[in-house]
Amino acid sequence: MSWKITAYASADTIRAALIAHEDALDWPDDMVLAGSEIAEDKPDEWQLEVWLERSPSGADRAAIAALFTECVPELIAQELADEDWITLSQQGTEPILEGPFYIHTPDFPDQIGLKNFTIPASQAFGTGQHATTAGCLAMLAHMRARGLRVQNMADIGTGTGLLAFAALHLWPRTRAIASDIDPVCAPVIAENIAANAIATGQGPGQLTVVIAPGMAHPLLRAAAPYDLVIANILAGPLIELAPDFAGSVMGGGNLLLAGLLQTQEAAVRAAYRRAGFRLAARTVRGDWSILWLRRRSARLSR
């Protein structure tokens, strides 16, 4: 049986808790956390949700309470039906239209004139519903419209595989590799590859999938350097990965970063400036920043 713990507070309070969660090195692996506004017409009223596949203990509650530096909001525990909570949360979600992309669950038909991707509700993140994923889709389309050419790309923290699929559509001859740290993503991506007729392999127009943290996989290292790396993860890991990405992106190559709150953007950009990247473009989706960075060429860095 699954459980959910919910805390309601102001947007600033929940954002501060999300940042504290990133810094919590001893956070239990089986507690999944997310923050969001309660409704579009109430932008300052947010909720923190924590899901567990077991009954929450006193230690679990204490870990959640420790994320709040001042007044701890009421922690409301709810026992859920014996079904996967992420699948339930995504059932019936409306399709997403971003640039040329139409992202929908199997409950909705394809749309003529758009690039359709069928992404069922699953245990992996990255269905297009979250502002960061949708923002990345829009930024990829913008990059293509600006004339960017991609021959070799990687999608780090791919979740469902959606952003890698989108890159393959925009640059049909690119070699693509997608990775995620979570083993649960492997069967999800495989199902989505089949549902969307994505070619697999290591050649042009094909996708390879690996499970690994960051760039720590032999295939990821062997395929470098990349002219595009996508990373829609979290601000903390993005900062930690800056040196690895600098060693994996070619001079003049591109990074698409997301998963960071606007309040975290300055720290992320500072880390990537030190790693030799400069800002090419940025966009904001709600409280989230999406960054297009370019690595300085060898000639410029001398």
Image (cartoon, helix red, strand yellow):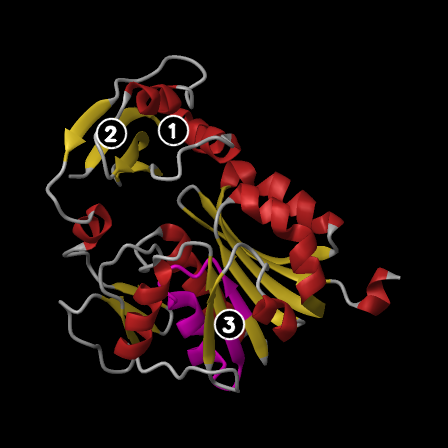
The picture places residue 160, in percent across and down from the top left corner, at 35, 63
The residue at 55%/46% (across/down) is 237
The residue at 42%/66% (across/down) is 163
The residue at 67%/62% (across/down) is 294
Along the line of sight, the residue nearer the viewer: 171 or 159: 159
Distance in Å between CA atoms under marks 1 and 2:
14 Å
On the rendered structure, is 283 left or right of 247? left
The picture places residue 81, in percent across and down from the top left corner, at 10, 41
Quarter of the view holding residue 33: top left
Q: Is residue 114 above or below residue 73?
A: below
Distance in Å between CA atoms under marks 1 and 3:
34 Å
Q: Verify CB contact (< 8 Å) between mark 3 and mark 2.
A: no
What amino acid type should be assigned to the residue bearing mark 1?
Ile
User: Can you tell which mark lies on residue 5?
Assistant: 2
**Are there few (<14), some (14-19), or many (20+) residues within 10 Å of tag 2?**
many
**Are there few (<14), some (14-19), or many (20+) residues within 10 Å of tag 1?**
many
What amino acid type should be assigned to the residue bearing mark 2?
Ile
Q: Is residue 172 magenta?
A: yes
Distance in Å between CA atoms under marks 3 and 2:
36 Å
The picture places residue 172, in percent across and down from the top left corner, at 47, 85
Q: Which residue is mark 1?
A: 14
- Label 2 sits on a secondary structure element that is strand
Which of the two discs, 1 and 2, labels the residue nearer the N terminus?
2
The residue at 51%/40% (across/down) is 262
Q: Which stretch did the figure color magenta?
A: 154-176
**Residue furthest out toward the left:** 81
What amino acid type should be assigned to the residue bearing mark 3?
Ile
Q: Is residue 298 above or below residue 35?
A: below
User: Can you tell which mark lies on residue 177?
Assistant: 3
Along the line of sight, the residue nearer the viewer: 166 or 208: 208
